[in-house]
Amino acid sequence: MSERWKYQIKTGLPWGVFMTVFMILFEIKEVSFIDQVSKPFFYFKAVAYILLGIFVLGYSSWKSKIKRQTK
């Protein structure tokens, strides 16, 4: 696995997991934890946050890291 992908996963995966947990906590007053986790749409959103974190956030941080290193 290339260094870029390792960096993207290290930076994007925690963001995706954090956003998933934050999403649960944000809606906990309206919908219980069990009800949220039991719906398939929850898993769709969780995967979307994780992929968004890895591909978008991870890639943009990789580009800025490379830009800082070349200066």
Image (cartoon, rainbow, N blue to C red):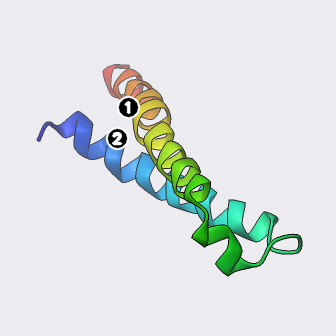
| Residue 70 image-quadrant placement | top left
* Rendered location of residue 42, percent (x, y): 60, 58
* Number of residues whose C-alpha sits closer than 10 Å to that of mark 1, classed few (under 14), some (14–19) or many (20 or more): some
24, above or below 4, in the image: below
Which mark is first along the chain, 1 or 2?
2
* Rendered location of residue 59, percent (x, y): 40, 29
The disc placed on residue 22 is: none
10, above or below 25, in the image: above
Which residue occupies 54% across, 46% down? 49
38, above or below 66, in the image: below
Residue 2 vs residue 66, the one in the foreground? 2
The residue that disc 2 covers is: 8
* Rendered location of residue 9, percent (x, y): 33, 47
**Local secondary structure at mark 2:** helix
Which residue occupies 69% across, 63% down? 22
Q: For this view, does 30 lie left or right of residue 62?
A: right
C-alpha span from label 2 to label 1: 7 Å
* Rendered location of residue 55, percent (x, y): 41, 33
Which residue occupies 58% across, 49% down? 45
* Marks 2, 1: nearer the viewer: 2
